[in-house]
Image (spheres, rainbow, N blue to C red):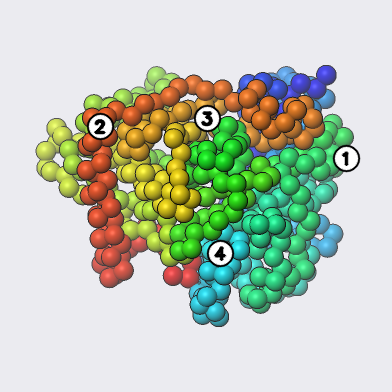
């Protein structure tokens, strides 16, 4: 009897195959890092190597089957998830023509052209799709039209990366709304394509494949998919979704009013809503949830995970070496030392990512400020803790921002992703926001969300709610410390004044933006 579910997860920096039991126990995971090439002709480009990346994907699938000893025939179903925003273009025979990853930044000129074409068009698109030009596909498609006309003319279909994985396994191509909506060419209300938006932007309107809801049993592994991966021909393949939406399912956030915080390279605050209501000021992203009939407000924080990695690699060589000797995590060692720094870091603060403003998205120059030349107080662990606190302050601002749009906020936060492995970081988030923070046993909830959808799609669970109840388990809840909350309230007030001042310096050309959206 087939008692296991497989998730294939194509992230920004790696791909992995994960096998779960029907009770949500992770049986095995094999992961391979990948990178996206920059074409030297096009600064900011990030091409996706579909041939090399598919080989890595197949290696992960074969590898996890071998590592676990689970017979391929015991996999009841497979589903897929991926980074969002990355797009692939196909010819009429289903062959890949062009692809870029989510971090591709070559289309700034095209975004600027769209703004000049019609200054009101971006807001019009946002109010229907929940997206702006900042992360969407419209400027990228215009770039292909302008710079690769032969590719553009041969294009018969557009797809996302999780759909690409299914096409490679089964030969079928269909786009689901949780990732498809990030193109900015999909209607939030109907969860279907908006070809008229493409036409308004001077693009073709005949390249949009069928839309199939998440959790739908779409096809089965075909002969080619079987030969490539070692999965038996005929295993059902279920439509998955975008990484954050499936993370929400894997963390149990499947009902209106629930919120989850996913901490990785980016930090995403996701708040579930029962109807799509775009922000009149276009500050917050609105996406289709992977649960039909649900949507999400999304507030994104740039680079918290990358900032902690930069700090570790640049300043914590001793901890890296100690981690090698002891087998412990270098971050765990850094957390232990930072635990001794008092809440508020003696008044020191830092600025990296700021509160999201989707229609005019800019981040200030990275900054540490308000420290004294006292090495006992202001050492590397103070600076490290300030980074953790800055991310929590930003999370609080996103909760308040979404509250303005939704009229409510959650009573507690679910925190998952790599950051959930840090008890210190979870406690700081609880102290800054004043909300209990609950951490699931499975921190990397994206793959679990895909496995849950696979099981629902083939009828192994009676409903999504039943599947979540059976598979999602809780490890710990962090309660706010009232004394720390008082300290952080004052720090938050300072941060809200400090960050606009730092942005103003960027606007004056005194400092450089950490990031600025294309076309601005």
CA gap, disc 3 and disc 2: 26 Å
- Among numbered discs 1 and 3, the one appearing first in the sequence: 1
- Among numbered discs 4 and 3, the one appearing first in the sequence: 4
Measured as percent of width and height from the top left, residue 70 is found at 74, 21
The numbered disc on residue 484 is 2
Measured as percent of width and height from the top left, residue 206 is found at 77, 68
Lateral position of residue 118 relative to residue 513, left or right: right
Please identify the quadrant where the N terminus is shown.
top right
Q: Residue drawn 57% across and 59% down? A: 130
Q: Quadrant of residue 446?
A: top right
- Among numbered discs 1 and 2, the one appearing first in the sequence: 1
Q: Quadrant of residue 374?
A: top left
Q: Nearest the camera: 373 or 346?
A: 346
Label 3 residue SS: loop
Residue 289 against residue 43 in the figure, above or below = above
CA gap, disc 4 and disc 1: 42 Å
Residue 151: tell me if it is visible: no
Mark 4 surroundings within 10 Å by alpha-carbon count, few (fewer than 14), some (14 through 19), many (20 or more): many
The numbered disc on residue 443 is 3
CA gap, disc 1 and disc 3: 34 Å
- Among numbered discs 4 and 1, the one appearing first in the sequence: 4
The answer to whether the residue labelled 2 contacts the one labelled 4, judged by CB atoms less than 8 Å apart, is no
Q: Nearest the camera: 265 or 230?
A: 265
CA gap, disc 4 and disc 3: 32 Å
Identify residue for label 1.
Answer: 223
Mark 3 surroundings within 10 Å by alpha-carbon count, few (fewer than 14), some (14 through 19), many (20 or more): many
CA gap, disc 1 and disc 2: 59 Å
Please identify the quadrant where the C terminus is shown.
bottom left
Identify residue for label 4.
Answer: 126
């Amino acid at each position: 009897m087939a008692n296991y579910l497989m998730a294939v997860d194509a992230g920004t920096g790696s791909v992995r195959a994960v096998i779960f039991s029907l009770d949500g126990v992770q049986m095995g995971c094999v992961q391979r890092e990948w990178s996206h090439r920059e074409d030297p002709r096009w600064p900011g480009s990030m091409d996706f190597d579909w041939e090399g990346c598919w080989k890595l994907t197949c290696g992960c699938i074969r590898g996890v089957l071998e590592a676990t000893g689970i017979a391929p025939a015991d996999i009841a179903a497979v589903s897929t998830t991926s980074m969002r925003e990355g797009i692939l273009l196909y010819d009429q025979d289903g062959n890949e023509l062009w692809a870029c990853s989510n971090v591709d930044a070559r289309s700034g000129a095209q975004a600027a052209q769209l703004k000049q074409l019609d200054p009101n068009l971006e807001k019009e698109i946002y109010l229907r799709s929940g997206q702006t030009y900042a992360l969407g596909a419209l400027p990228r498609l215009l770039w292909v039209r302008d710079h690769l006309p032969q590719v553009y003319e041969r294009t018969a279909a557009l797809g996302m990366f999780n759909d690409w994985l299914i096409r490679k396994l089964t030969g079928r191509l269909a786009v689901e709304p949780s990732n498809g909506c990030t193109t900015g060419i999909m209607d939030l209300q109907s969860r279907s394509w908006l070809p008229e938006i493409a036409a308004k932007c001077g693009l073709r309107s005949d390249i949009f494949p069928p839309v199939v809801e998440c959790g739908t049993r779409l096809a089965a592994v075909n002969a080619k998919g079987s030969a490539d991966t070692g999965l038996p021909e005929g295993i059902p393949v279920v439509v998955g979704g975008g990484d954050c939406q499936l993370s929400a399912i894997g963390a149990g956030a499947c009902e209106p009013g629930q919120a989850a915080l996913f901490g990785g390279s980016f930090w995403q605050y996701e708040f579930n809503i029962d109807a799509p209501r775009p922000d009149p000021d276009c500050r917050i992203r609105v996406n289709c949830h992977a649960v039909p009939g649900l949507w999400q407000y999304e507030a994104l924080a740039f680079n918290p995970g990358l900032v902690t990695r930069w700090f570790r690699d640049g300043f914590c060589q001793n901890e890296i070496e100690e981690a090698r000797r002891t087998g412990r995590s270098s971050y765990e060692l850094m957390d232990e030392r930072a635990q001794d720094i008092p809440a508020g870091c003696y008044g020191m603060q830092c600025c990296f990512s700021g509160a999201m403003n989707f229609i005019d998205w800019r981040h200030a120059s990275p900054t540490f400020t308000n420290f004294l030349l006292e090495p006992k107080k202001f050492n590397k662990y103070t600076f490290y803790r300030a980074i953790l606190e800055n991310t929590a302050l930003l999370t609080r601002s996103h909760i308040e921002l979404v509250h303005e749009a939704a009229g409510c906020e959650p009573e507690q936060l679910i925190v998952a992703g790599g950051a959930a492995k840090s008890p210190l970081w979870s406690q700081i988030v609880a102290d800054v926001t004043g909300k209990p923070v609950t951490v699931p046993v499975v921190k990397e909830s994206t793959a679990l969300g895909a496995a849950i959808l696979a099981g629902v799609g083939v009828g192994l669970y009676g409903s999504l709610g039943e599947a979540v109840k059976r598979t999602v388990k809780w490890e710990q809840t962090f309660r706010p410390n009232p004394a720390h909350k008082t300290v952080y309230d004052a720090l938050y007030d300072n941060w809200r004044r400090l960050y606009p001042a730092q942005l103003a310096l960027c606007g004056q050309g005194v400092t450089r933006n950490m990031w600025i959206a294309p076309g601005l």
